[in-house]
Image (cartoon, rainbow, N blue to C red):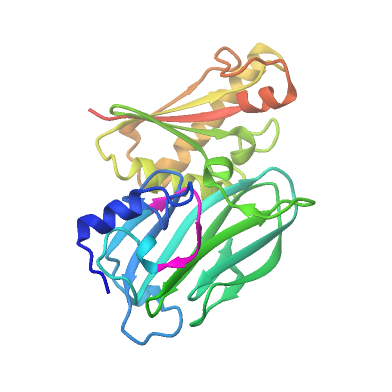
Amino acid sequence: MRSFTLAALAALAAAPLAGQDAFGTVGSRPFQLRGQIYYLDEGADHLPDFSQLRPQGTISTTVLNVPGQSFEQGFPGVTDRFEWFAIDYRGAFTVPAAGAYRFRLTSDDGSRLFIDGRQVIDNDGIHGPSAVEDSAQLSEGIHAIEVQYFQGPRAEVALVLEMAVPGGEFEPLDFARYGAAQFRQQGKRLEAELGGSVLFDTNSAELKPQAVVALEELKSAMIDPNPAGRITVEGHTDNVGGDADNQRLSEARAQSVVRWLTQHGVPASRLTATGFGKTRPAYANDTAANRAKNRRIQIIVENP
């Protein structure tokens, strides 16, 4: 049996695997699926109670697409264990319309899928690569997701999460496409862009109940790790409607986000709310799709 150093394992995990990122790359990345890694006792035959364990490291990925393969081809990346480990992935994703969405979870060994805190798939136990499918009725917008996985004895590993939109076919659930926000970083400046419909109903500045999922993700992934950063929340609209109405709506939406952040522990002294109405379109207002993209909230963190 081959042995690997920690550095070699990290390099393997960071290398693309069939165009994907194996179980993930080391560290926490904003608005990706983030996994906490745990050690298991030898002989474990089912998923653990993660609340009773201490995490050994963090990985992030935009997609879970590790097909059945030798354990030597992909590892968590921050541990020297090839077996008897578990990963608890958490994140958020959005769907474009309400409907019945199908999910398929393939794993070796056990896994489970939760959406909005409700178990959708149970594929637990010691077994070779096997798939379990089920569906969930989802509303338009953002949803919390959790994927639990454990690897028992060495030999093979597998973990693939797929989704089929209503009327569509299964494909790996890509958080770069369905993630809660678009994220950009330039030097010390971090920026997240959320579609207005993720947070608000049409012509409303009151946060949707499900908006909490996106804001919690924003706070934990981008704001909390940068405690010295100055935060600007910008509201933007499309070009439909009067200038004054658009300006008022953009300001009110930015203020709603700032109010939520202050209520959840972010000092008001770090926050600024600004509305730009329709004056700063990111896309040409020439199609319904582009106008929807212009109805957005942008959160900017400027580190010193």
Residue 66 located within the stretch drawn in magenta: yes
Q: Is residue 260 left or right of residue 296?
A: left
174 shown above or below 194: below
Does residue 129 show up magenta in the picture?
Answer: no
Residue 40, relative to residue 273: is it above or below?
below
Q: Residue furthest front?
A: 1
Expressed as whole percent of the image width and height from the top left, the position of residue 125 reads: 50, 82
The residue lying furthest to the bottom in this view is: 43
Q: Residue at x 80, y 51 (%)?
A: 167
Instruction: Report the number of numbered marks.
Output: 0
Magenta span main SS: strand
Residue at x 68%, y 22% (from the top left corner): 291
In the image, what residue occupies the spot 21% across and 55% down? 7
Please state the extent of the stretch shown in magenta in the rendering: 60-70
Q: Is residue 9 above or below residue 3?
A: above
Figure quadrant of the C terminus: top left
6 vs 281, nearest the viewer = 6
Q: Position of residue 196 (x, y in %)?
A: 61, 33
In the picture, measured across the screen, residue 144 lies left or right of residue 245, that is left
Residue 117 appears in the figure: no
Picture quadrant where residue 30 is located: top left
Q: Nearer the viewer, residue 17 or 84?
A: 17
Q: Position of residue 65 (x, y in %)?
A: 51, 56
Q: Residue furthest right?
A: 167
**3 or 121: nearer the eye?**
3
